[in-house]
């Protein structure tokens, strides 16, 4: 892993989505957001997965302008990436084998190192994942004027 004070280069494996339901959700979110005035294909979609209980997970989906990692405290580096069409998704947090499998390709990414999270104003969705089912818990879509 190459590092400088401001960036960190990591090699991430490509992920293949195993869940057709997750893929359909992401397709619909991208379709919705692509109609918004702020949407750019260069935005990176971020999927953050955290374990709530044994075999129950919380999934957050949002967008960022660049991959980042915090220099201090608990942080989650991405563990993989994938593309839906030409839209980049990075996945961080807990690896859930029923959602993803690691594919053969690898790619280098540069993460911006920050002392504080860079707060950006993009739509955000929260899902629960349990027993193979993905359920929308909360949604905060921005207005697409």
Image: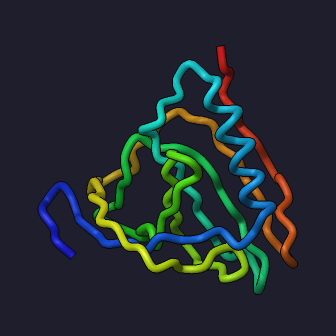
Question: What is the tally of numbered marks visible in this picture?
Answer: 0
- Front residue of 112/106: it is 106
User: Residue, x 62% and y 68% (percent of image)?
Assistant: 49
User: Residue, x 65% and y 56% (percent of image)?
Assistant: 60
Name the quadrant containing residue 76. Answer: bottom left
Query: Residue 40: percent from the left, percent from the top?
Result: 47, 31
The C terminus - image quarter:
top right
Query: Residue 114: percent from the left, percent from the top?
Result: 29, 53
Name the quadrant containing residue 95. Answer: bottom right
Q: Residue 136 vs residue 50: left or right?
A: right
Query: Residue 140: percent from the left, percent from the top?
Result: 71, 37
Reply above or below: 28 against 115.
above
User: Residue, x 37% and y 46% (percent of image)?
Assistant: 66
- Front residue of 87/117: it is 87
Q: How is the image coloured?
A: rainbow
The N terminus - image quarter:
bottom left
């Amino acid at each position: 892993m190459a590092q400088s004070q401001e960036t960190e280069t990591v090699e991430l494996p490509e992920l293949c989505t195993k869940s057709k339901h997750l893929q359909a959700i992401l397709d619909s979110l991208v379709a919705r957001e692509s109609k918004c005035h702020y949407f750019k294909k260069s935005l990176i979609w971020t999927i953050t997965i955290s374990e709530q209980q044994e075999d129950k997970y919380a999934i957050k989906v949002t967008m960022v302008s660049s991959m980042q990692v915090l220099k201090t405290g608990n942080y989650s580096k991405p563990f993989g990436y994938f593309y839906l069409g030409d839209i980049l998704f990075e996945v961080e947090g807990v690896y859930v084998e029923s959602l993803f499998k690691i594919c053969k390709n690898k790619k280098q990414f540069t993460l911006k190192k920050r002392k504080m999270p860079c707060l950006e104003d993009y739509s955000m969705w929260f899902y629960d994942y349990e027993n193979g089912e993905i359920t929308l818990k909360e949604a905060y879509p921005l207005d697409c004027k």
